[in-house]
Image: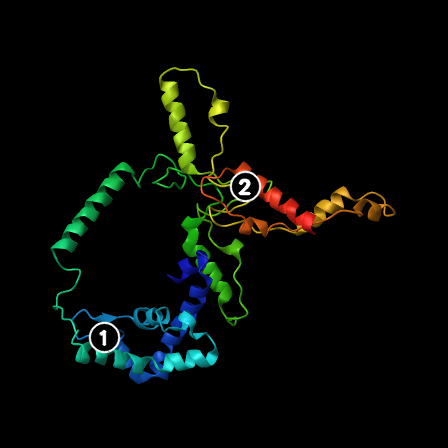
Amino acid sequence: MLPYLAASGHNLYTKDVWLYLQRMQELKQEDPEGYKMFAEGYATIRRTDKQYGGIPSDQIIEQLLMRALKTRGGLTRGRGLTEVQQAVWLLSRNVCAEVTNAVHDDLLGLKGGSSEQHVRIGKTSDRRNEEDYENTLTFFRLRNPFDTSHNELENIVTGKQASSAVNIYDAKDIGKGILKKMEGLPVKEFTFKRKEQAITMGSKIQRKDGTVIQINPQNLFDRLIALALVSSHEKETDLDEMLSYELTPFPPSLFEGEELMREAHKPQITELLKKHYSPKPTDKMQKLEGTVVLDGGSLLYTINWTKGTKFQEVAGLYVYTLSSSLRTT
């Protein structure tokens, strides 16, 4: 698993698992008693005496500490996150848990009971498993994952074929190469490089000019289906008109996704000014005199983007707000 974590860019997991495996290899010498208990099956934590009650320690942390951390009275609900508050909250968790159980079970009598049967064993679970099994078979009948008619890597859901830059099928070897470079280096000194990781079909691959075009595949698919239907009825169609509308639900020049704005590249403004104001050194300041550079990117976060509003209306509101702020200054 470790090579795949390194190849896929899970850098923190890679370092943590790397250190964990090293410590586990030394467990027999450093803690013989702990190694003996671990080898005998005491690797899980039990909150109940049920047969299937053992769960890993990380799940215990999620079910107890992390859940309590985010509920009312936890650190994220007004207590604060100073070092003293964290220590008091953490060290008092066992006492609070005992008090809660005593009030819940003994005082109120709300202790519930359950059978020894595993929750996943029953008619309902069996029926769901059968439905999932049939759905999986139907999926693979319609999308053959063993199609050998071509050699390119293909997404069996969308039918999209990978480009030559995709090398995810070599993820294991790529991960081993990254792990080889980690050997003998301190954890804090080693840094991962994205160019050394595996390239997937979902990775952003820029064009030669450096631009990235994001197209909504559903809109494009609907457009092509409409063209196919019209063409099948032998009607005259204007291909340019049919494909002249936007294929994205958001302006790709401003947003990476529907809710994630692109980062501003402010050095480009400097390069643009140098390009347009680069005549003689003597009159350089004269040409720049009176030029106002205003960072209006914050307005995009403050303007109310009402659902259904067209981009032209948003742009007009942006220009109006920007011009109003200039007049006030």
Residue extending furthest front?
A: 328
Query: In what element is the residue under mark 1?
Result: loop
| Kind of residue sitting beneath label 2 | Val
* Residue visible at 26% across and 41% down in the picture: 139
Q: Earlier in the sequence, mark 2 or mark 1?
A: 1
> How dense is the environment of label 1, judged by Cα within 10 Å: few (below 14), some, or many (20 and up)?
few
- Residue that numbered label 1 is attached to: 47
Q: Of tags 2 and 1, which is closer to the observer?
A: 2
- Where residue 113 appears, as percent x and y from the top left, is 13, 71
Instruction: Evaluate if marks 2 and 1 touch, with contact meaning CB atoms under 8 Å apart.
Output: no
Q: Nearer the viewer, residue 199 or 100?
A: 100
- Where residue 160 appears, as percent x and y from the top left, is 40, 38
Measure the alpha-carbon separation of dots 2 and 1.
56 Å
Q: Can residue 282 be seen here?
A: yes
With 68 as the anchor, is 112 left or right in this view?
A: left
- Residue that numbered label 2 is attached to: 314
35 versus 204 height, above or below: below
- Where residue 203 appears, as percent x and y from the top left, is 47, 48
* Residue visible at 42% across and 29% down in the picture: 223
72 versus 236 height, above or below: below
